[in-house]
Structures are given as structure tokens and as C-alpha cells.
Amino acid sequence: MAERYELKSKEVWDGNTAASHALRQAQVDVVAAYPITPSTPIVQNYAQFLADGYVDGEFVMVESEHSAMSACVGAAAAGGRVATATSSQGYALMVEVLYQASGMRLPIVMTVVNRALASPLNIHGDHGDLYLGRDAGWIHLIANNPQEAYDMTLCAFKIAEDERVRLPVTTNQDGFLVSHTAQVVEPLQDEVAYKFIGDYKPMNPMLDTKNPQTYGAQTEEEWHFEFKASQHKALMESSKVIDEVFAEFEKVSGRKYNRVESYKIEDADVAIVVMGSAYETAMVAVERAREEGIKAGLVMPRSFRPFPYNEIAEKLRNVKAIAALDRSCPMGAMGALYNEVSGALSANGQSAIMTNYIFGLGGRDTTVEHILEVIKETDKNAKAGKRVTDLQGFINLRGPKLSFN
Amino acid sequence: MKKITNLKEFACTPDRFQGGHRLCPGCAHGMIVREVVNATDDDLVISTATGCLEVCSAIYPYTSWDVSWLHIGFENAAAGISGAEAMYKALSRKNRSYNPDKNVKFVAFGGDGGTYDIGFQSLSGATERGHDFLYVCLDNEGYMNTGGQRSSSTPVGAHTTTSPRGRVSYGEKNRKKDLTMIMAAHGCPYVATAVPGTKHWKDLATKAAKAISTVGPTFINALSPCTTEWKFKPEDTTEIADLAVETCMFPLYEIEDGHKLTITYRPKQKIPVEEYLGRQGRFAHLFKPENKWVIEEIQKQIDEYWEYLQRREEAGV
Ligand SMILES: Cc1ncc(C[n+]2csc(CCOP(=O)(O)OP(=O)(O)O)c2C)c(N)n1
Ligand code: SF4
């Protein structure tokens, strides 16, 4: 039995420490991992928890991320709680196995500390990796600070393991900006956290050898489509479970989370849609814009998959102009968030003038002033009643202004 | 460890790998798998790499596997089984084991492509980490599921679709990777070669029983004659396997603790390699006058290697 870890009611944790404590409190049975900046401390902390007797699961220190996720798949199919963490190239190396994990409906939890994808090599934060795994069939939750990194990871286990879901979940946090930024975090006590998540509920465990299971079979034309459609259904319908888990989490923690978060959106004319730590920067920018007389508001999908189309559209029902900010360069298109938001609006018969901004690649600073500038440009569109600014702009990019129309 | 006695008794073991799969008639994969899974009475959890065995044995809604079975991808059978084995350890320690009265053993199967090539990294990693599992390579010396391409196990002179014979080519030019020795060099407690069939059935079954009951990572490299791509008649599979042993093209031996080598079968009289090559379409072009030197070269390599094995056994190191 693992030792109890004495936690203060307020701890000073960075995002990595926060995530690793969530793994510890979940008493994960198998962690299989491979280190990569900036997620490495999660793995190191876990190794130390093990060395100090605070966890008694198996820690499999594999030879690559491909094997990390493969071992997670084997362990989860065997029938117990499984978690890992990665970033960037490590995530890229896992991609093949991400699809296999979700296709087998295995409730693995992975903290992704978001980081740019090479080339050029860069260890800092952007959402290149988050978007890479977009269609892999995992639930994606977004955490904007260490407190949320902790809270989302606890929730992730409960969502993933719910028998209506049984899908793998990533909790995303921005590299360095969250992973290495220490803040005050209010953790739950171990017993409370574990009770919230609950004991692992096995479904078709391979280790129940009395009832042999076949995992990862081949399907041909007559079945493949049905498998994929039912997997998609489970992911779409996980929204309900996410809502329930967030509501339960509020009861134990007092902290309320929503699949779509917003700030001052109720009476806004212009809206910023953004994911990750920039959400908090944008909050300040919204305040400043309001001081200057622009009715600005802010929206963020906390679950990027399943994407909350109707809830986002509802939040944006009354705005005239929207800027969707993507922390990843889409290469030949609008950013993913722009596309999702415009899809959400059109599906609900709404229209607003939409623009796309690319920001923060490879850890590039995005300040309150930068976002305030975007709000002002968006306000021009709102006032003109049509788009008078460029379709896609780049925030804080050196050199001549880059934009596409 | 299960006692392997006589063939009749062994053959009566209830099948845990059922017939009705879609392997080609005469395919050695099924024979090897059946012998391995029947070599233990313990419960089994099996992983299989992408390849002929996988695509032929578990096509939804059917499965030939009467044991728990997992396929993830081409290169990760060893990583996948290491995760399952880790979970078994964790749950046993936490008293949450699903079937506490039974021992569970872990076995991975991969073709030579999934083992010598793309899966080598994960196999090496899982072995180094000391997981308690047996890895069986079904060595048919090529990528057969994708239509007979070369692998690093393809022997010199063999025609494959990516090392074809042609006007200026005699087929595969590189020497077959010596994976068995590489696995031994990992310090595995037990490593062996084996062939399917009736003549050496006991050798394979005993080795499998030994490997499964040994704690730690063990490895068996099993030659798996492929009727389709080696081009021989389906009824000749075991004869071809036997010829590989009698010519010393595929010698039978085992290595314990990474160093102690024992030859488990010695041909009374080593047969010239032509006998083996001549029975398979993939080597037919070697019998043209301009390619005769390749056969001589293969014979030379075989002789040298056989000599090496014998000396190593004698030396006891
Ligand atoms: C990552 C990846 N690359 C390529 C393939 C295509 N592929 C499937 S099976 C196979 C060859 C299998 O050969 P081998 O491992 O020798 O097994 P065999 O079919 O000969 O038994 C290949 C190339 C794949 N499934 N995955
Ligand atoms: S192609 Fe060869 S290895 Fe594959 S199933 Fe047929 S005989 Fe067996």
C-alpha cells in the first residue's frame, strides 16, 4: 500500500508538478513514459514518488514514446489504470499508437505539455502537437494554469473510465507557460481525490483469463465503418459525461468548469476565441478594451474534442465580430480553431464576421497589448458591419506585416 | 514447466489457437504458434505484430485465439506485451489480480519484419527492461503479408519483390542479420532457434516450455517456411524445415544466460545446401551457371558458421 503524502491546503506547484500529483492521487497502476522537454518533470516526479513509496504501481521506463504508448495500450487492455505524459516530437512519435489506443476504447490518460514541432527544433510552447492529435479519437481537455492542470487530470480519469465513454483523454497545458510556472494550487487531499475518481472499473480485461479477449482485430469493409462510427458516437456523447464530471468536481472542490469557458461575453460586440494560457492574458486585454469603450468578450472551448459546437455558438450568439486565435501555423489554411468556430456558427444559422490570428509559435510572447490590438481590429469589423481587416493575421511576428486575405 | 512427453499426448492438448484461420495451406506460422501455446498449461496473454499471423487469425467477428490476445501495430508487439506484463505485476501486488489462482504467462509473436527490422527497437527495449515474457519470431525471411518483400532476415541469393533476380542481379545481396545472437547478447536468460514439423517437434515444444517457465525475457527464433513466397508445395513445409536443419542453413541451438551455447541437434551428415535451395522457387535462379558462385558462397558461410557454433559450444563460453 502506498504511503500517504502530506499536502498543505495551498501548495506552490508548476503545471508539471500539479499533473504528477494528480497521477499519484489516482494511484495509477501502470505509468509507461519517455522523457521530453517540457513534460519531463512529470515522469521524474513520478519516479521519485515511486522511490519514496508514495505510489506502488509499475513504472515502465521505455526506450521511446512509440513504445510508451504501446505499453500503455497493453497495460490498459490488460485491465487497470494507465497514464503517461509527453510533448511535441514525443507526441508525434506516438501518433500511430494514439489511433490504436482510441480504436480499442482504452481509457488512458495523458498529459500533453504542448510544444512546437520541429523543424526548426524548438522546445517552447505552441499548439502544433495539440492539433496533430486532433483526429486521433482522444478527448482533449485544456488547462490554462497549474490549478487547472491538476483539476483537469483528476477529471480526465473519471471521464475516460466512465463506461459510457471508455476513451483515452489528453489534458493539455502550455509548455513552460504552465508547465514551468509556479503558482498557488489548492489540491484535494489524497482520500478526497481518490474517492472522486473512484476505483478502476474493468471492462473486458485481458488478464481475466477465464474470459479471453481479442483486442485489435482486423476489420474489412463490412465492419470497419461501424466501428469508427460507434467510436465517434462515444466521443461526441462524452460531452454529457464531461458535464457530469465537472459538476461532481465542483461539489468536491468548489471549482466550476464548463466545456466552454467565457469571460464577459454576455453583452459583448466583439469576441476573442482562444485556447490555453493566452486565455488569461486575453482576460486582461478584455478589461482594458472595455476601459476604452469596446465591448469585448472572451470564449474558450475547454474540451477541444469533443468540440462544443452548440455551446460555442450560443456564447457567440450576439457578437458582431470574432477573432479566433490559433497557437499553431495551419500551413495552407485557416487555423483549426477558426474552422471549428465558423462551423459552429453556420450550423446554428448564426453569422459574425470572422478573422483568424496566428500567435505564440515556438514560445513567442503574446502580451496584453497584442491581444488588445486584435480586439481593436476586430472592433473595426464590428463597426463596419463587414470585414475590413485581413482574413488571417500574425501576432508579434518580426519583419514586414504578414497577413492573408 | 510442462513436461513434454510424446507426440500423441502433446497433440491431444486442447487447442488454444483454433483452426479455421486464413493462413495459406502449408503455412508454418500456425504450426509454430500451436506448438508454443500448447507447451504450457499456464494461462496466456498474447500479443502479435502486424503480419500474416495477425491478419489471418483475428478477422472480426471471428478469432482463432482462445486466449487473451492483443494486436496493436507492426513494430510494438514487444512493447505492448511489456505493458500487459507490467499491469499483471501491479495488480498482483495490489491484490487486484483477476484470476489469483492461476499463473499468467506472456508471449509475443512477430514476423521477421516485425522483429528483425521495424520492431527491433521495442523488442530490444522490452528485453533490456527484463519483462517476463517469451518473444517468438516467425522467421519466414521476408515481408510476406505485403507480398514478399525483403527483410534483414532474407538470406543471400533469395529472390524477393524488393531484391528481385534480374538480368544483372542474383537477388538479395546482404547477409541475413544474426538476430538470435543479438538477442543472446542482451543477456536474455534463454534464447533458442527452432523449426516446426514432426521431426523436431519435441525440440520446439521443449524449448517453448523452457522459455515460458523461465523468469525474464526469452526469445525463440523459429524458421517458418512460407509456401507462397518461398515457392514450394504446401505439403512440403516440414520437409523444407528439416532440410534447413540438415544443411545447417538454420542450425538448432539454445543459449542460456547470454553465453552458454548448446547445439540441440547435430545432423549425422551435413547435407550440401543445394538440396535446400533447389527445393524453393526463390532460389531457382542461383542454379544458372553465372550464379553458381553464389551457392558456393552460401555454402562457405554455412560451413564457417557451423564451425563457429561448435567451437563456441566446446569452449563453454
Ligand atoms: C508502420 C507500418 N509499416 C508498414 C506496414 C505494412 N506491413 C504490414 S505487415 C508487413 C510485413 C510483415 O512482414 P513480417 O513481419 O515478416 O511478417 P509475415 O507477414 O511475413 O509473417 C508490412 C510491411 C504496417 N502495417 N505498419
Ligand atoms: S504468405 Fe507465407 S507466411 Fe503468409 S500465410 Fe501464406 S504461407 Fe504463411
Image (tube, coloured by chain):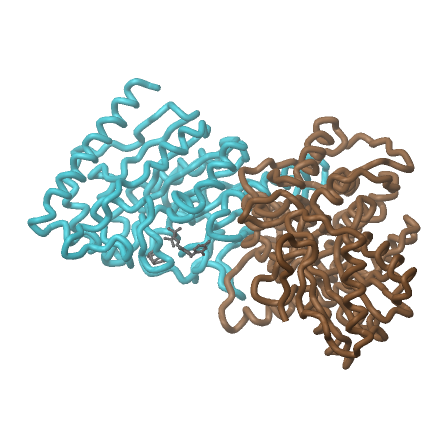
Chain colours: A brown, B cyan
Q: Is residue B298 left or right of residue A85?
A: left
> Within the displayed image, which quadrant is ligand 1 positioned in?
bottom left
Query: Can the viewer see residue A209 in this picture?
Result: no
Q: Residue at x 69, y 36 (%)?
A: A41
x and y, in percent, of residue B9 in the image: 41, 44
Relative to A326, residue B170 above or below:
above
Given the current orientation, which residue lies at the most extreme left position? B289
Q: Nearer the viewer, residue B43 or A320?
A: A320
Relative to A183, residue A361 above or below:
below
x and y, in percent, of residue A20 in the image: 74, 39
x and y, in percent, of residue B272 in the image: 14, 39
Q: Nearer the viewer, residue A340 or A25?
A: A340
Relative to A81, residue A140 above or below:
below
Q: Is residue A40 left or right of residue A24?
A: left
Query: Looking at the rendering, which quadrant does residue A311 occupy?
Result: bottom right
Query: Can the viewer see residue A89 in this picture?
Result: yes
Given the current orientation, which residue lies at the most extreme bottom position? A349
Given the current orientation, which residue lies at the most extreme front position? A400
Q: Residue at x 73, y 55 (%)?
A: A160
x and y, in percent, of residue B205 in the image: 40, 40
Q: Nearer the viewer, residue A212 or B118?
A: B118
Q: Residue at x 68, y 40 (%)?
A: B91
Query: Looking at the rendering, which quadrant does residue B97 occupy?
Result: top right
The quarter of the picture where the C terminus of chain B appears is top left
- Tally of marks: 0
Q: Is residue A368 left or right of residue A36?
A: right
